[in-house]
Image (spheres, helix red, strand yellow):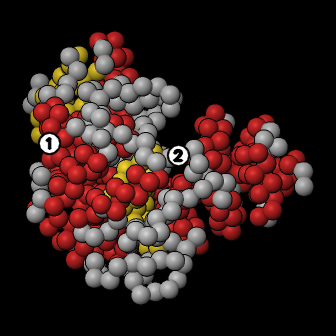
Amino acid sequence: MRAVDIIMKKRDGGELSREELATIVNGYVSGEVPEYQVSAWLMAVFFRGMSFRETADLTDLMLRSGSTMNLSGIKGPFVDKHSTGGVGDKVSLILAPIVAACGVRVPMMSGRALGHTGGTLDKLESIPGYTTRLDEQRFREYLERDGFAMTGQTDAIVPADKKLYSLRDVTATVESVPLITASILSKKVAEGAEALVFDVKSGPGAFMKTVEDAERLASSLVKTGQAMGKRIVGVITDMTEPLGDKVGNFFEVEESIDCLRGKGPADLMEVTYRLAAWMLVAGSHGAGSHGAGSHGAAGLAESVAEATKRCEEAVLSGKAYDLFLRNVKSQGGDVERMLSLYGNYRSAFMRELRAPAAGHIQSIDAFKIGLAGVYLGVGRNRTSDPVAPDVGFIFERKKGARVAAGDLIATVYGKDAASLDAAWELITGSLSIGPAEPKRNPLVIKEITAL
Ligand code: URA
């Protein structure tokens, strides 16, 4: 089978067989198919798309390019959450201990900040001593003992995605629903969860800028995940404004602590509780069933309303916060130092964003804030760039707030004076103020389930 014929078939709108897809994917990993041909194939997929069957085969082939986590011997149910990426999205840090406190094990494999979106690993590593490089033995040990563990992707897991994702990044083929589906899902299936909850962000601060596009991705993730034998929920949530009041690596650890102490901002808690509740429901389904290796755990929660109550109780009782501290300790973090840095870990380079006129805040553009964050040192343009722990945004007011001219909107911290200068036009441009109180968008837009 020649790669050129496979590229031609996809270029002309044909449906590729599993063998043809295997020729490209396995050939690329082994070095037999050169990068220039894989690039051409990616572009053909970008324009012609893939059938559901092709997407499922591609996901499975990518999954089989490496090893998978072995969670056997640990009592489940295992449920994970994945966000397609946003600004101020620290939900994983809050949700994992909440869900673990309710009896679900969360084997979480996360990513790093890239472009305007933040990364869970960078946030966790802003805690002094905390490591996200866990070998399988330690990952299993912490998962069993603390109910959740947080790690990065290893070289052994889905090597095909490592190569394909880097190539997509430089060939303008990232924004393809089947390619995104296979990339995300192959990694999530490899980590061993039986059920997955996807937070598909929609809006200027997200990958998917419109609800329609977010819905296409959510449907593809749900349908393909189901075909891989997993129980799946796709939740489309709004990413017009940054989530919560803090954006920045350690700043978001602080806000996660606030949330786990019962003092989190309403928008962040609404999204967190909704996703956490679905994880409980997903963990409960499948109990007693014999399908697809899924076990579930009866009695966790049968409805989202019941699950939400359990999650709220996990916060109110302090159980979720205790588990968070336990995980920090397990993964090498210095709990006392983290708590002593709370509220004080701030770069010396600070500037205030103040309202230029009186009125209501119409919007704070999450995309511009995310991009500005790259200059400040919150995020990065390349995976090898360093990030800073003590920079970012602390918002005093957000959409809908009534302001007088000169009122403080946010305090902004940068890694140096030049970074603040470079980011400032984006930051001021992110803010729009008008006379009328703006309409509020729902945070949870749509839910698609396959349980
Ligand atoms: N995140 C991933 O892991 N893969 C994609 O293709 C897009 C976002």
Residue 418's x, y, as percent? 34, 12
Judge whether 98 appears above or below 399 on screen. below
Quadrant in the rendering for residue 50 = bottom right
Residue corresponding to mark 2: 154
| Label 1 residue SS | loop
- Identify residue type, mark 1: Ala
Judge whether 161 appears above or below 128 on screen. below
- Nearest the eye: 341 or 52: 341
Residue 118's x, y, as percent? 38, 39
Does residue 60 appear left or right of residue 352 in this picture? right
Point 69% across, 64% down: residue: 57
Q: Quadrant of the N terminus?
A: bottom right
Point 78% across, 41% down: residue: 31
Residue 348's x, y, as percent? 20, 16
Point 34% across, 62% down: residue: 144
Point 40% across, 68% down: residue: 74
Determine if the C-beta at disc 1 is less than 8 A from ligand 1: no
Asked if residue 252 shows in the view, the reply is no
- Nearest the eye: 403 or 16: 16
| Label 2 residue SS | loop
Quadrant in the rendering for residue 416 = top left
Which label sits in the foreground, 2 or 1?
A: 2
Residue 425's x, y, as percent? 34, 21
Residue corresponding to mark 1: 401
Asked if residue 36 shows in the view, the reply is yes
